[in-house]
Amino acid sequence: MSKILSINAGSSSLKFKLYSMPAEVVLVSGLVDRIGHDDCIFSYHVGSKEYKSTQPIKNHTEGVKLVIDALLDSGVIEDKSEIIGVGHRVSHGGRYYTKSVEINHDVQQKIADLASVSPLHNPVNLLGIEAFEKLLPSAKEVAVFDTSFHSTIPPKAYMYALPYEYYEKYGIRRYGFHGQSHQYIYSEVNRRYGKDYSDKVISCHLGNGASICAIKNGKSVNTSMGFTPLAGLVMGTRSGDVDPNILPFLAEKEHLSANDIRQMLNHKSGLLGISGISNDVRDILKAESAGNQRAKLALAVYVHQIQHYIAAYTADLNGIDTLVFTAGVGEHSAPIRHRVCAGLTYLGVKIDESANKDNDIDISEADSRVKVLVIPTDEELIIARETAKIIG
Ligand code: ADP
């Protein structure tokens, strides 16, 4: 039995879970939120007990110290050395990493180099890695990349039709993200329903960020995010796919710099951009019920784009056995699942409305040709599994 920490470091947050492996039992789970503020909120669960405190936390290193102290104080560990591995979610592995890897200085340097293509995520992932290196040097650290699960996507699906030299020079191609989530979804479909339902799986990760993945016999064969996590679906504040010529057009008309355009596409677009209300599906559904026409339009575009990707990936897979909804919207929003599935009857998708309202796991009608599932994602478990595998 060994203890492994699973870490997901964001710009102002640090999510963690301590697992006992190989049993995959969660010993502690928690969140350090609002890092960099005077009112940082630290919360964690040990069994059914919840602990919460507010204090100033300057940086990720202080956040990690808080986590380790809490593990010791709560008696979950008696000594830091009991934690033999720390697995980190790392956004972009680029062309360097098709698998999870034990972290050393070379790996850290490559993760840092990839900040040029993943400026929002790789640098903060690195902050988490450096903090543990400092405070828990006895543990081996492992990087589990969002992009690795998609390394099986064939060239016909990952190449962009741009001059080939940019692929060679900068590695410009589709990489895909949310790999830990799509990998977990596949493993759960396979574990629960076996091979008959897991040959051709389409996994819809609909959170604030969103992506869809086509999975054939356990391998990603296409996914909607691309070179960066901006492509594909309409997201909370990200545009998803747009005609690339819109960008130089706007740059000229509105005198926007490359950075202005990046900000607009990542933070002012998506559901927020169309509705002008919020990035949160709940707020937009409420506004739509109150008669707001832009809210109605935003949801229509959102659902339409999801349906398009499901149709495209059914073609990539030459069929579909199972359609899965996961992440914030996918797990909790019955109206969105209803609307998406209402446009898929030609595939033989039929959902049981009462199971859908109850967020049941299997929401398909008995005679649906496609199994339709709602599965809560568990990226942290994939990080712990990969870490255990690497450190042996
Ligand atoms: P992230 O992508 O940041 O990890 P999550 O997967 O937790 O986020 O998803 C967050 C989003 O889930 C919220 O922005 C909100 O739009 C959506 N969400 C959460 N609960 C519900 C709900 N009950 N109904 C509709 N949408 C929901």
Image (cartoon, rainbow, N blue to C red):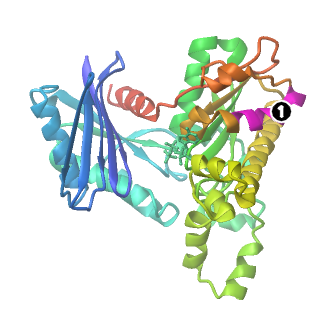
For the point 60% across and 20% down, the residue is 360
Please identify the quadrant where the N terminus is shown: top left
Magenta stretch: give its range.
Answer: 337-347
User: Does residue 266 lie above or below 3 as drawn?
Assistant: below
Q: Nearer the viewer, residue 237 or 321?
A: 237
Q: Residue furthest front?
A: 290
> Relative to residue 379, is residue 193 drawn left or right?
right
> Relative to residue 145, is residue 323 drawn left or right?
right
**Residue 343 colored magenta?**
yes
The image shows residue 103 at horizontal and vertical percentages of 33, 45
The image shows residue 222 at horizontal and vertical percentages of 70, 41
User: Does residue 389 lie above or below 6 as drawn?
Assistant: above
For the point 47% across and 64% down, the residue is 119
| Label 1 residue SS | loop
Task: Considering the whole magenta stretch, tell me its main secondary structure.
Answer: helix
Instruction: Please name the residue that numbered disc 1 is placed on.
Output: 344
For the point 78% across and 21% down, the residue is 370
The image shows residue 72 at horizontal and vertical percentages of 11, 33
The image shows residue 147 at horizontal and vertical percentages of 54, 45
Please identify the quadrant where the C terminus is shown: top left
For the point 65% across and 47% down, the residue is 285
* Residue 176 seen by the camera: no
* Residue 103 seen by the camera: yes
> Relative to residue 284, is residue 27 drawn left or right?
left
Q: Mark 1: few, some, or many residues within 10 Å (few <14, many ≥20)?
A: some
Identify which amino acid the numbered label 1 is placed on. Answer: Leu
Q: Residue furthest right?
A: 346
Q: Nearer the viewer, residue 341 or 378?
A: 341
- Label 1 within 8 A of ligand 1 by Cβ: no
